[in-house]
Amino acid sequence: MGTLTAQINLTEAELKLLQTPVYQECGMFFDERRSHFLKDRLQRRLKVVQLDSFYSYYRLLTSREGRAELALLLENLTVNETSFFRNKPQLELLQKSVLEDILRKKQERRDWTLRVWSAGCSSGQEAYTVAMLICDALAYYYLRNPLPFDMPTPKPLIPPPWKLEILASDISYASLRAGQEALYSEQHMEPVDYTTRLRYFEKKADKYGVKPQLKELVQFDFHNLKTEFLPRRNDIILCRNVMIYFDEAEQKRLIDKFYNCLNLGGYLFVGHAESLFGLSQKFKMVHENNGTAYQRIEVAG
Ligand SMILES: C[S@@+](CC[C@H](N)C(=O)[O-])C[C@H]1O[C@@H](n2cnc3c(N)ncnc32)[C@H](O)[C@@H]1O
């Protein structure tokens, strides 16, 4: 009885050792402030897999047979906090200035496809927020810049010939499933005003479901930001509140990768507590009314 409930001691050396596969796999780094959280999750996993030492657990994580357990551990270590319309000043910058700039340049080139990537999307609120903002912005843009194309009826969310592709990615399968399901509780919906609810949501029992026309604009997929092969040719990348869990070396690598994943003149949005300061010189900061974004600048070589 005692052996089942007693916690196995986790030494500092073991803790350090166990951080290696986690860091190597997904870039997450646990400094002193967050090591308590890591210890707690490791204790829990050790109980579930019923091993008798953390060294055996390390051996499992680093073995071929342990791939599934490593994925489960990562799932337990990610912080998935998110919300609709998070960081409003930044979203206003996106909707008013950034989109206006991108749409105007695209129209000049007769390039009608807009590609957005929510990297580290959690349960989808960020991607759907951006989808709603872009639909509204495109409708308003169309009103001011009508194009010689017939508008089909019923009026689509995206006025032709524009196309919108939003990719929402994460390493947490549970989050990706929640995003795909697109059902949100009253509490989740708190930041969504009534007009927006009426336009983009439908009631499903005690939840709000994202309407199919909006839902189909967002594609959910697994992408680990630690890997080299990430989705390219994006006009906008949002990677908010993800880099804070990485160390500086990993943040630098990621920003470099984002640079290559953006189209010329594309924009990167990071979280409120994050910045590119000291990490990259390949972006120009755009700051308006408390909202910040980073625009890719073209560098020689
Ligand atoms: C705090 S949430 C941020 C959600 C949303 N971007 C926002 O700002 O509201 C962080 C997300 O990053 C994901 N994440 C952490 N490490 C990752 C990695 N290496 N690759 C992809 N996603 C990762 C987590 O699973 C989690 O869902």
Image (spheres, rainbow, N blue to C red):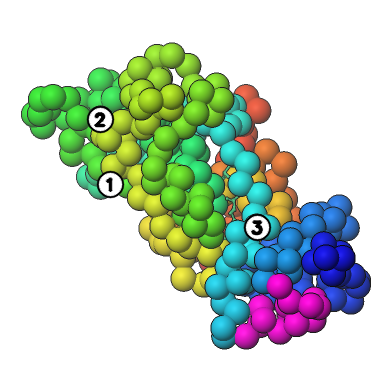
Write down the quadrant of residue 159 in the picture. top left
- Three-letter amino acid code at the position of disc 2: Leu
Distance of label 1 from label 2 (alpha carbons)? 14 Å
Where are the magenta residues, as a range? Answer: 50-63
The numbered dot on residue 157 is 2
Q: Secondary structure at mark 2?
A: loop
Front of the two marks 1 and 3: 3
Q: Earlier in the sequence, mark 1 or mark 3?
A: 3
Disc 2 under 8 Å from ligand 1? The reply is no
Q: Is 151 left, or right, of 171 in this rendering?
A: left
In the rendered image, the vertical position of residue 125 relative to residue 111, given as above or below: above
Q: Earlier in the sequence, mark 3 or mark 2?
A: 3
Q: Which residue is mark 3?
A: 76
Residue 124 placement (x, y as % from top left): 47, 42
The secondary element bearing badge 3 is classed as: helix
In the rendered view, tell whether residue 183 sits above or below residue 77: above
Image point 31% across, 35% down: which residue?
Answer: 214
Q: Secondary structure at mark 1?
A: strand
The reply to whether the C-beta atoms of the residues labelled 1 and 3 are less than 8 Å apart is no
Give yes or no for residue 54 being in the magenta stretch.
yes
Q: Determine whether 228 is above or below 235 in the image.
A: below
Query: Would you call the spot at circle 3 few (<14 residues within 10 Å), some (14-19), or many (20 or more)?
Result: some
Q: In this rendered view, identify the residue nearer to me: 113 or 107.
A: 113
